[in-house]
Image (spheres, grey):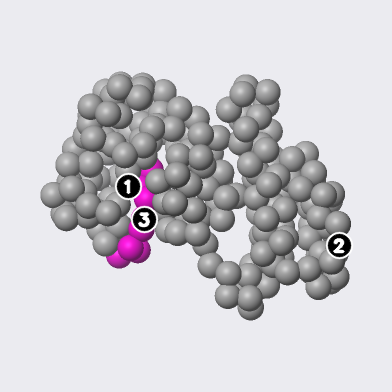
Amino acid sequence: MSDLGPLTQAIKDGDRGAAEAQTQAAIDAGTSAQDILSALTDGMDDVGRRFKAAEIYVPNVLIAARAMNVSMALLEPQLVKEGIEPSCTVLVGTVEGDLHDIGKNLVAMMWRGAHFGVVDLGTNVSPDDFVKAAKETGATLCGLSALLTTTRSAMRTTIEAIREAGLTDLKVIVGGAPITQEYADEIGADGYAPDAGSAVEVARSLANV
């Protein structure tokens, strides 16, 4: 088994070349896909913690996520071979009337880095489309994003639609610039993520993974 410390460091540094080389070396050395995956997620977890603490910023997260994607492209066949599946399926989308996607994309990247199966529904997603996707995918979690105060009310409408559809087991996480813990509680969300780093912690807690 190879030393996976340099792989974790490559993800932290956002070094795509090193991430690719270290991942391939670990695969060639016969290291289990689970151990390699753990090294990758350790790196992204550190990125999330530093982002949450404002020690790094959006560009750093994007660079780390790209390094993670390079490694995952190599690792994916090994994960399939060893029968290792994502922790659970999560939906993510920006609510109806809102076309902003940077925050949503950051959360999606962090969730992928934590090995959740992410279904990105895009922006301006209607309550009905969230409900339809939840039924089709059997998702465990649903992340709702909004950047505008004028569109955050769509979160309430979406949560109501999810509950009315009988999807009582689907846990809903909300986040975005105009969202607070108080507002999340008011509209009946199961979780609130003030930033992309927190989104991983909240998702793991709600999904019990």
Q: How far apart are labels 1 and 3 at the CA level?
A: 6 Å
Q: Secondary structure at mark 1?
A: strand
Q: The disc labelled 3 sits on which kind of residue?
A: Thr
Report if the CB atoms under discs 2 and 3 are less than 8 Å apart: no
Q: The disc labelled 1 sits on which kind of residue?
A: Lys
Which residue does the numbered mark 3 point to in the structure image? Answer: 140
Q: Is residue 176 left or right of residue 12?
A: left
Q: Is residue 103 left or right of residue 147?
A: right
Mark 1, other Cα within 10 Å: few <14 / some 14–19 / many ≥20 = many
Q: Position of residue 64 (x, y in %)?
A: 69, 42
From what the image shows, is residue 139 above or below residue 202?
below
For marks 2 and 3 on the same chain, the one whose residue lies earlier in the sequence: 2
From what the image shows, is residue 65 above or below residue 181?
below
Q: Position of residue 159 (x, y in %)?
A: 23, 41
Residue range corresponding to the magenta coloring? 136-143
Which residue does the numbered mark 2 point to in the structure image? Answer: 2
